Image (spheres, rainbow, N blue to C red):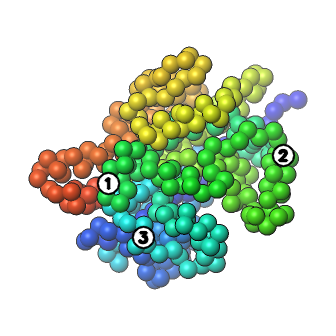
Amino acid sequence: MAIAQPDFTIGIEEEYLLVDRDSLALSPAPTELMERCGAALEGQFSPEFLDCQVEIGTRVCADVAEARDDLRHLRSTVARIAADYNLAPIAASCHPFADWRQQHHTDRDRYNSLRQDLAGVVRRMLICGMHVHVGIDAPDQRIDLMNQLAYFLPHLLALSCSSPYWQGEDTGLSSYRLTVFDNLPRTGLPPRLESWGSFERSVAALTELGVIEDASKIWWDLRPSSRFPTIEARICDGSPRVETTLTLAALVQSLTRMLWRLSLKNQRWRIYDTFLVDENRWRAQRYGLSQGLINFGAHEIVPPDMLADELVALVAEDAAALDALAEVENTRAIVATGNSASLQRGVYARARELGRDHDAAMRAVVAHLIDEFHADL
């Protein structure tokens, strides 16, 4: 019996921070801005936990070209309306110099409940992420592919890192966002799941006790979506540039198809112990693209340029079938120029070389992030 080919549709969710164009500090979103964006984007826009955050989501897209058109429209609309209030969105995972103690959460039942349930842990959640959904109709197939796809989560993180700064200090990490997010329960790498049925039973064990209301409160780096028939990759930092977001989405989509294609030959990707994959996750969080990741099969650390070449070669056939080869090949350009974390550090270093003090150099980084947001629109 032939194995039905999934649609491999994609959807992208992004969270943005709003900054004042003059001070470059975070600013709460005016109610009128939220209402105008909500009306203009017809269900594709919503508030987030903090009142300086907003979230957008593309429609279900057949391919990355369709996702590009929708994402540009969403970003452009938010930027245009925000400009009317002297605000600008940025798509980095942390604002370089904001203080979380000075932020306020959105006054809605969902967020009031989160603040109460998660206490001090959630108050530091001044972070933004990017999620990629890939359409897989069959639930058990979703679980099987998810178990294999988890190996590649550190690769996606390394490419996306955009949060080196926290409260005006260089943390030494490429993704400080994960340091904050991992303090929440039900986060991190997903466990190896036996089947869709076993996943549902585990969720039921918590929902029936009232510990969580539904599977949307499971915040693993990769999960079966609670709302859609998709695999949802949640590992990535927010990407300042549209084209980086699209490359990451194309990689998730192409990797998923590659793993499905292996199943046609009765093959599968080797599933490594979570302990080992988590070491690569840490390397990506700490070093981004500067130190490479471990190839456990070859027992060696592979440098970033070689990793990019191997990753592109691995999924080239699938990317071509999905009309996403150009986006996947952009992986090499990201490695060559550096991820956002390294670019932000470069902006800071150049500002200091020009004689600017620390605070002015931090503002230069935010100005860079605003430019990056608008670059591909």
Quadrant of image for the C terminus: bottom left
The mark tally for this picture is 3
Look at 60% across and 33% down and name the residue there: 277
Task: Give the answer, above or below, for where 88 lies relative to 239.
Answer: below
Label of residue 116 in the image: none
Q: CA distance from mark 3 to mark 2?
A: 40 Å
Q: Which residue is mark 3?
A: 101
Mark 1 residue type: Glu
Label of residue 198 in the image: 2
Left or right: residue 86 versus residue 188 is left
Residue 1 falls in image quadrant: top right
Specify which label sits upstream in the sequence, 2 or 1: 1
Left or right: residue 322 versus residue 172 is right
| Mark 3, secondary structure of its residue | helix
Specify which label sits upstream in the sequence, 3 or 1: 3
| Residue 191 position within the rendered picture, expressed as x and y whole percent measured from the top left | 71, 41
Can residue 165 be spotted in the picture?
yes
